[in-house]
Image (cartoon, rainbow, N blue to C red):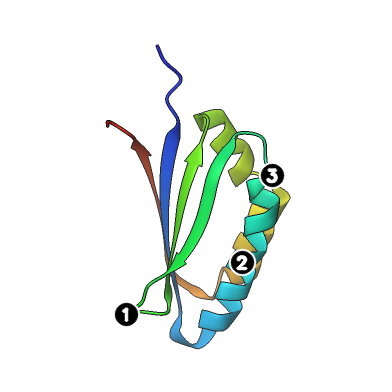
Amino acid sequence: MLNTPLTIVANITAKQDKIEMVKTELQKLIEPTRVERGCISYDMHQDNENPAHFVFYETWQSEDALQKHLESEHIQHLLAVTKDALDAFVVTKLTKLS
């Protein structure tokens, strides 16, 4: 079986009064994540219509690389400091078909 890269779409919605704090904390993830083993791409977006909605579009070499990322110190820090600042945090795992 081919080792197909794993695509992740993470949808994060901040509480209205926490948008800037959440944005700042999310931006802190970019540099350390991009140098992680197995990270192919890691891009952060903000919804043009709803500034509380952030989307990460990520590509990982494997499920194992993603798991190591989710267990990393910077992700654990994010989860701790934003636990009361988020309305939603939904991660979707996708496999590219074409």
* Residue at image mark 3: 35
Give the residue type that dot 3 points to: Val
Residue displayed at 69% across by 60% down: 77
Residue drawn at x 27%, y 32% is 98
Question: What mark, if any, has residue 27 been given in the picture?
Answer: 2
How far is mark 1 from mark 2, CA to CA?
Answer: 19 Å
- Tell me which residue sits at (70%, 52%) in the image: 32
As drawn, which residue projects farthest toward the left? 98
Instruction: Rate crowding at label 2 as few (under 14), some (14 to 19) or many (20 or more) other CA atoms within 10 Å.
Output: few
Q: Residues within 10 Å of mark 3 (few under 14, many from 20)?
A: few
Mark 1 / mark 2, whichever is N-terminal: 2
Earlier in the chain: of badge 3 and badge 1, it is 3
Instruction: Label 1, secondary structure: give it.
Output: loop
Vertical placement of residue 9 versus 37, above or below: below
Q: Amino acid at mark 2?
A: Gln
- Measured as percent of width and height from the top left, residue 93 is found at 38, 41
Are discs 3 and 2 less than 8 Å apart at CB?
no
